[in-house]
């Protein structure tokens, strides 16, 4: 069994870098009705839920904290923030909701930041050529035989979000794949 990779471990090859991003705070917004959820969300962040397979940047009205809303399924959206305070504010605001809830996923979901001109090549080798998201597109794919959510940030920048228990496995596959990359 491979040694677990430390939180600060970065993997790199020519024109590509993969590193854990421990700053990402994650919460799942689970709901029965997207329109009702959007109505409840607008006063807090000035935005509705993202369209299917999309993500959007938003800003909390009270303190201006920036976040990303990422579509996961018709009944779930992920909220990604750099701090826990916006998630806590949303949990408090939705505490009495009978048709929606906020489930903190920080600690259970690991974020891997992938950047560089060869990002698409790495993603194709780990899964499929269709697993390379455009900017602000949210995809779910199987990489290294594990279900991973991919968020396109910019061209050649992708955030991989996966269950913590699979992080070392996926990082191991990435490490071995980068060793095979032609220079």
Image: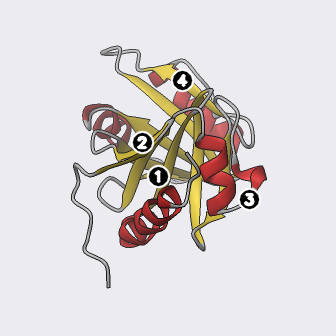
Label 2–label 1 contact, CB within 8 A: yes
Q: Quick one: label 1, few (<14), some, or many (20+) residues within 10 Å? A: many
Query: Counting residues from the N terminus, which is met first, the one under dot 2 or under dot 1?
Result: 2
Percent x, y of residue 111 = 40, 49
Q: CA distance from mark 1 to mark 4?
A: 21 Å
Callout 3: helix, strand or loop?
Answer: loop
Callout 1: helix, strand or loop?
Answer: strand
Q: CA distance from mark 3 to mark 1?
A: 33 Å
Q: CA distance from mark 2 to mark 1?
A: 7 Å
Q: CA distance from mark 4 to mark 2?
A: 20 Å
* Residue occupying image coordinates x 56% and y 54%: 181
Q: CA distance from mark 3 to mark 2?
A: 38 Å
Q: Quick one: label 3, few (<14), some, or many (20+) residues within 10 Å? A: some
Q: Is residue 134 visible?
A: yes
Label 3–label 4 contact, CB within 8 A: no
Please name the residue that numbered disc 3 is placed on.
128
Image quadrant in which you'd find residue 35: top right
Image quarter (top left, top right, bottom left or bottom right) of the C terminus: top right
- In the picture, measured across the screen, residue 145 lies left or right of residue 9, that is right
The label shown at residue 5 is none
* Residue occupying image coordinates x 47% and y 51%: 28
Please name the residue that numbered disc 2 is placed on.
94
Q: How many marks?
A: 4
The label shown at residue 57 is 4
- In the picture, measured across the screen, residue 145 lies left or right of residue 23, that is right
Image quarter (top left, top right, bottom left or bottom right) of the N terminus: bottom left
* Residue occupying image coordinates x 42% and y 71%: 166
Please name the residue that numbered disc 1 is placed on.
101
Residue found farthest to the right: 130
Q: CA distance from mark 3 to mark 4?
A: 27 Å
Callout 2: helix, strand or loop?
Answer: loop
């Amino acid at each position: 069994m491979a040694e677990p990779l430390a939180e600060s471990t970065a993997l790199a090859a020519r024109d590509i870098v993969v590193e854990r991003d421990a700053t990402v705070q994650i919460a799942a917004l689970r709901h029965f009705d997207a329109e009702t959820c959007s109505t409840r969300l607008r006063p807090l962040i000035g935005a509705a839920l993202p369209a299917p397979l999309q993500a959007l940047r938003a800003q909390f009205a009270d303190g201006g904290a920036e976040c990303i809303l990422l579509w996961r399924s018709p009944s779930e959206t992920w909220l990604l923030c750099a701090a826990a305070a916006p998630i806590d504010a949303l949990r408090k605001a939705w505490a009495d909701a009978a048709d929606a809830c906020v489930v903190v996923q920080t600690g259970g979901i690991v974020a891997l930041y992938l950047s560089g001109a060869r990002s698409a090549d790495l993603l194709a080798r780990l899964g499929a050529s269709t697993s390379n998201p455009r900017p602000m597109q949210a995809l779910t794919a199987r990489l290294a035989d594990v279900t991973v959510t991919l968020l396109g940030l910019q061209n050649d920048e992708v955030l991989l979000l996966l269950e913590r228990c699979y992080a070392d496995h996926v990082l191991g596959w990435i490490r071995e794949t980068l060793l095979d990359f032609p220079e």
